[in-house]
Image: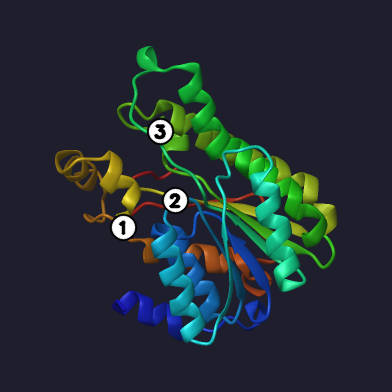
């Protein structure tokens, strides 16, 4: 456990205890850090994963061993109907649902526009855009019963257009940012707050897969704080937005977590 993880574990936000939250894409990276942090607050945590079964099972076992309550569920949320299934089964397992974190997503390869295919477009947009809309639509009736929160994971790429070969990923995250604003207005009457967190360069399997060492160094040099962030560096923003006590008058906002790389 890192120093930052220990510090996060010592923080107590009373209004989160006992609530149920679903985190999509929670097996590794930011999603896994969120699952731990929510569990440390006494929340019941739905851990969704797709291909990373071993890390997801390990994370669930870790949380359970610490006295937490989890529901582990596998699905490819880029497939039609799967986001809805994940939401419905998680809500059924816990008996209620108070929060949804739409975190599942990915670049699925760096491709310049001239080399993109319709199939690649559909894969990226289904994973990063349609899954968010589908999960939100499915969660809405559960969240409106008592009021709740939705937090979407967007990206710095939504504002700067993305790096080499990442234009489509950036555009899909632009969709996420825009729908965050729209849903915040649409769901306000149901006492559902909708916000987003936009990470910058974070050391996760995402960059291990798509960004080589030279590219990472160039990106690091563009960060005023001088270092690449960790998943734990993102956790505080999500905890803040999940808590009605801390952020009850905040909706439709996008919190930038990027070490100063972008200051909109």
Residue 184: percent from the left, percent from the top? 72, 48
Q: Are marks 3 and 2 in contact (CB under 8 Å)?
A: no
Q: Image quarter for residue 87?
A: bottom right
Q: Residue at x 65, y 55 (%)?
A: 86
Which quadrant of the figure has residue 150?
Answer: bottom right
Query: In the rendered view, would you say 173 is above or below 100?
Result: above
Q: Which residue is mark 3?
A: 160
Mark-to-mark CA distance, 2 and 1: 24 Å
* Rendered view: 150 above or below 206: below
Q: Which residue is mark 2?
A: 51
Q: Quadrant of the N terminus?
A: bottom left
- The local crowd at label 1, few if under 14, some if 14 to 19, many if 20 or more residues have their Cα within 10 Å, is many
In front: mark 3 or mark 2? 2
x then y, percent, for residue 104: 51, 49
How far is the residue under mark 3 from the one under mark 2? 29 Å
**What residue is shown at x 71% (from left), y 40% (from top)?**
182
Which residue is label 1 attached to? 229
Q: Residue at x 21, y 54 (%)?
A: 226
Q: Quadrant of residue 176?
A: top right
- Camera-nearest label, 1 or 3: 1
């Amino acid at each position: 456990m890192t120093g930052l993880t220990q510090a996060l574990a010592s923080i107590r936000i009373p209004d989160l205890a006992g609530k149920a939250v679903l985190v999509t894409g929670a097996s590794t990276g930011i999603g896994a850090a969120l699952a731990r942090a929510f569990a440390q607050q006494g929340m019941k945590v739905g851990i969704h994963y797709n291909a990373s079964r071993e890390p997801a099972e390990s994370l669930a076992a870790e949380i359970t061993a610490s006295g937490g309550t989890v529901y582990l569920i596998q699905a490819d949320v880029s497939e039609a109907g799967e986001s809805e299934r994940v939401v419905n089964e998680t809500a059924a397992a816990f008996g209620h649902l108070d929060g949804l974190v739409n975190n599942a997503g990915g670049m699925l390869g760096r491709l310049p526009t001239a080399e993109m295919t319709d199939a690649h477009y559909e894969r990226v947009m289904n994973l990063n855009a349609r899954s968010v809309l589908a999960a939100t639509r499915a969660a809405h009736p559960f969240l409106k019963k008592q009021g709740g929160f939705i937090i979407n994971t967007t990206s710095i790429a939504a504002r700067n257009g993305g790096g080499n070969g990442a234009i489509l990923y950036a555009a899909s995250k632009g969709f996420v940012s825009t729908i965050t604003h729209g849903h915040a207005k649409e769901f306000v009457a149901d006492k559902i707050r909708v916000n987003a967190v936009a990470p910058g360069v974070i050391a996760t399997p995402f960059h291990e897969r798509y960004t080589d060492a030279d590219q990472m160094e160039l990106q690091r040099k563009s960060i005023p704080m001088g270092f690449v962030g960790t998943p734990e560096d993102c956790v505080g923003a999500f905890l803040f937005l999940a808590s009605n006590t801390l952020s009850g008058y905040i909706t439709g906002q996008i919190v930038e977590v990027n070490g100063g790389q972008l200051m909109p």
